[in-house]
Amino acid sequence: MDVWILVELPPGKVALDGRWVYDEKYPKDADPYARARWVVRGDQMKDSYALEDLYAAVAHMTSVRLFCTVVALLDLEWGQYDAVTAFLNAEARQEVYMKQPQGFDDGSGRVCLLKRALYGLPTSPLWWFDTARAYLKELGFAPLASELCLFRRDDGVHILLYVDDMIIAAPTKQMVKDTAESIALRFKIKEIGEVTEFLGLEIKRDRPQRRIWISQEKFIDKIVEKFFPDQQLNKAQSPWPSKTEIPVNWKELDVAMPSTDWLERTGSLNFLSMGTRPDITYTVQRLCEANQGPTEIHIQILKHLFRYISTTKSYGICLGGNYRITDLKLRVYADASFAVL
């Protein structure tokens, strides 16, 4: 793939360090395996970037649910795919030098001039997204104006792209297969199969009723075990504890947990809220108000919320149903001054 070439370091240039990143993978239909990936230390770069030079679009959870709704109502076929080492498909757009990888140094004193968007560069996600979007455009796809990661073609094929994960939906299985083969001509992709999990969402489909159920039971088990290890949480039937109020002057009270630890917990809950659990949104919002310094009362509410999601971890959202897609209407509510609510 010609990720880099070995060159002498030009005067005035700096070679970035790299590091090995180790990971364990647990495929749903295969044995677990360990993986090592060499990444560049992009945090050592002295360059300053504008936001538009770094921002790479990712699909919002609302768009993921919309995509599933369309698939359900139109009874489309679909398949899930993964772009293998996706970033390396994009060419590097700037001059970046890196020291040779540990264990693969030839001893010549030369450095690596990057030719591809190596993992670790702050610009690599954008370079990959631009490369993928350009090729999908060549295949006849166009992104939605309001969602750059949702692509549609005139023959009814839809693609949802989230970094290196993608779902292809089409009226027939052959169209899904043909589209995947067209993409594989440019990028190496791996077929995952039927869509049962995506971005932490567990997906179950009822085709006769044209419904798709999404939930996050495994994610809930994961965060409960992470933040409350070896604890048996009592059951709770509501997201907010009864007879509990946050005092108006709570900012004057002592901080009971470091903000970094608190942010990890509220971030996990916010992801759950935006995904499949709108019933916890209000409680999560109130907890996030204390992101800079939670008090003891916030911690009590947080633990109660974890008890609730543990009790109701099988809850989810039903998308689609016994109506036609043409029945969907855009409705906007406004107050007396016509401010959109």
Image: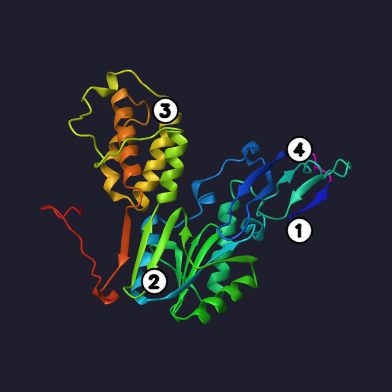
Q: Which residue is mark 3?
A: 259
Front label number (4 vs 3): 3
Q: Which mark is in front, 4 or 2?
A: 2
Q: Which residue is painted at 29% across and 32% down in the image? A: 301
Amino acid type of disc 4? Gly
How far apart in space, not on screen, are marks 4 and 3 (Cα)? Answer: 41 Å
Q: Secondary structure at mark 2?
A: helix
The residue carrying pointer 4 sits among few (fewer than 14), some (14 to 19) or many (20 or more) residues within 10 Å by Cα, namely: few
- Label 4, label 2: how far apart the Cα atoms are: 55 Å
Secondary structure beneath dot 1 equals: loop
| Residue at image coords 36%, 71% | 72
Q: Which residues are magenta?
A: 8-15
Please identify the dominant SS of the magenta region: loop
Distance between mark 2 and mark 3 Cα atoms: 41 Å
Q: Classify 10 Å Cα crowding around label 3: few (below 14), some (14-19), many (20 and above).
A: some
The number of numbered badges drawn on the structure is 4
Camera-nearest label, 4 or 1: 1
Residue 13 located within the stretch drawn in magenta: yes
Q: 53 and 100: which one is in front?
A: 100
Residue farthest toward the left in the current orientation of the protein: 336
Q: Earlier in the sequence, mark 1 or mark 2?
A: 1
Residue 285 x %, y %:
30, 39
Identify the residue under disc 2. Answer: 71
Point out the tag, 4 or 3, that comes first from the N-terminus: 4
User: Dividing the image into 4 quarters, which one contains the N terminus?
Assistant: bottom right
**What amino acid does circle 1 point to?**
Asp
> What residue would you read off at disc 4?
12
- Asked whether 72 falls inside the magenta stretch, the response is no
Residue type of the residue flagged with mark 2: Val
Q: Residues within 10 Å of mark 1 (few under 14, many from 20)?
A: few
Q: Position of residue 247 (x, y in %)?
A: 21, 25
Q: Which residue is mark 1?
A: 2
